[in-house]
Structures are given as structure tokens and as C-alpha cells.
Amino acid sequence: MVTEEEFDRMDANDEIYWTENGDGQPYGKIYLSESKGQIPNDFWGIEFGTNQRGSLEVEKLFNQRYFDFPKPVSLLSNIVMLGADKDSLILDFFSGSATTAHAVMKLNAEDGGNRKFIMVQLPEKTDEKSEAYKAGYKNICEIGKERIRRAGKKIKEEAGLQAQNLDTGFRVLKLDSSNMEDVYYTPQEFELQSLFNENVKADRTNEDLLFQVMLDLGIELSAKIESKQIAGKNVHFVDDNYLVACFDRDVNESTITEIAKLQPIYFVMRDASAANDNVIDNFEQIFEAYSKETVRRIL
């Protein structure tokens, strides 16, 4: 950093370099005669972006500078193009401000690609005195999620009709312990009475169970999910009829029969979903009658 007077002096002496591409970020020139040792040089050159440009990109999306030195979109775009094709899955284990997601969406808009991204980031807390914290972003992940939303909207607006089918949607998943109580995995270590207790942890939602089943079956977590009402119960459909799951309470034979008639590849329900013992007794018979090939599982 230099004072305004020093900057004006350097600019008058042609000691300031102004970058191109419209960001106008100035740099002080370092002459070989004034340096000690070798002058550092960027491998790709300044046209691939700078941290200053990355900061400006985030600032334009939020109207506030929440990150000091994020990577520029142009840098990540070039990295992605080095070793990936238009249908690649891009993984970033240190997502930060989610520049990689921004770059992937932008590339897809430019060349019609179908790249997907996985962003991984620990929920590092933001400083309570920071502008990000004051704006409601309590950790880095919250900033990254909002950036993906805003960047996706901005890319679509700028690309117009060219990006009308661009997929900028994403899911947010948090790492957690199993949804199942220990009795589900090690029943031999529990007393007889405890074996009849609920085997799903009390604080878990139906969506929690659905994603666990998807992982167990090797289904991509980005797969299409729809929910429909069947005989008054909420039923999840993953990849159309590939997986059908119902985790509601008081499920009766009517719901099971309507699902069996759809002939899914997999059907999963929880043990506690059955309205009564007769439902469990008739469960297999219903599927044998309407969809013998369906793989049935009960949690």
C-alpha cells in the first residue's frame, strides 16, 4: 500500500502498470536493476486473473467484500479446462468462496457443457466483527452457497437465450453420523426389550433417510428427486421409478399396493412406517403379486 501522493508520483514516472480486461487494478513496476535476485513471474501470466480481480468478482455479486484473496474465475476456468471435458465432475475439497462452482457454471454457459461440481468446505466461523457476519453469514459455507445462487442468476442473465437450459441448481448436504440407532447395527449387544425400540434416531427427517438409502444403493446424490402423494402418504421418487421410498407413519396396504403397481427397481420403507402388523405380514405378498422383480428393503 502507498499513499495517494506516492501513487501520483509513481504514475507520473511511469512506474505503474494498469492491467487490462477492464478491472483497472494497478501494480507497481519492479525493475531488474532495483530488485534483489530474480523477479517472480506468474506461470500463466496476468491474463489468467489475480486475487484482486477475484475480490472484485465477489464484491460485485454481494456489493460487499467478504473475502480478501479469493481465486479469480478465469484462473479456475483454465484449470478446469486443463484436465476435464464437457461432461466431467469437478471436485474442490477446499471450496472457500465457491469460485470453482462459479467457473464451472460459466464454462457450461459458454460452451454448452454439462459439467457438475462438488464443493467441500468445513463450516469455518466468520469473525463476529466482519461484514460477512453482520450480513448474516455465520460461516464460510453460507457465503459459498449464496455466491453460487447469485453467480448462477447473473450468468443466466448475461447469457440470455444461450443459457436458457443452463442448470444452476445445487444441493447442500452436511456430514453427520448415521441415521440409525446402534441397535440397528449391533442387536446382539442389547437387551431383548430394547430390540423393539425405534431404530431411527428421533431427530432425523424423511429426507435424511432418503439420502442415506441413496448412498447405500450407490445412487448419485444429484439424482432427480420428486415427491408425490399416494393414498395420503408422501412418497419419494428418485430417478423416476428407480428408487421409490416411503417413510411416513401409518402406511397401510393401499399405499403399498399402489407403489407395487408402479414396479420400481427398489422400494424402501421404515419398519415403524407400517400402520399395523398386518401391513408387514402382507408386504411381501403384495409385491409378489404386482412387482416380483422389485428389490424391497425395510429400515
Image: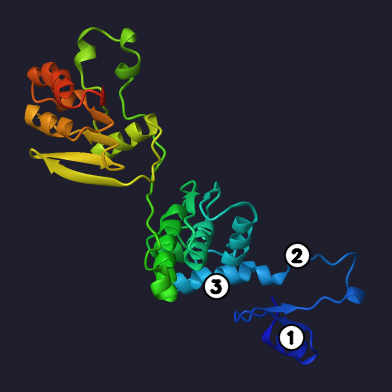
Mark 1 surroundings within 10 Å by alpha-carbon count, few (fewer than 14), some (14 through 19), many (20 or more): few
- Tell me if residue 129 comes above or below residue 222 in the rendering: below
Instruction: Please provide percent x and percent y for residue 229.
Output: 13, 43
Asked if residue 15 shows in the view, the reply is yes
Residue identified by numbered label 3? 56
Q: Which label is found at residue 6?
A: 1
Q: What residue is rendered at 63% in x and 82% in y?
A: 24
Mark 3 surroundings within 10 Å by alpha-carbon count, few (fewer than 14), some (14 through 19), many (20 or more): many
Q: Which label is found at residue 42?
A: 2
Q: Quadrant of the N terminus?
A: bottom right
Q: On the rendered structure, is 19 left or right of 158?
A: right
Asked if residue 299 shows in the view, the reply is no
Q: Nearer the viewer, mark 2 or mark 1?
A: 2
Discs 2, 3 touching: Cβ within 8 Å? no
Q: Which label is found at residue 271?
A: none
Q: What residue is rendered at 47% in x and 66% in y?
A: 109
Identify the mark nearer the N-term, 3 or 1.
Answer: 1
Query: Mark 3 is on which residue type?
Result: Leu
- Tell me if residue 41 comes above or below residue 117 in the rendering: below
Q: Mark 3 and mark 1: span between their CA atoms?
A: 24 Å
Q: Mark 2 and mark 3: span between their CA atoms?
A: 20 Å
Helix, strand or loop under label 1 = helix
Q: Nearer the viewer, residue 49 or 67?
A: 49
Query: Mark 1 is on which residue type?
Result: Glu
Q: Nearer the viewer, mark 3 or mark 1?
A: 3
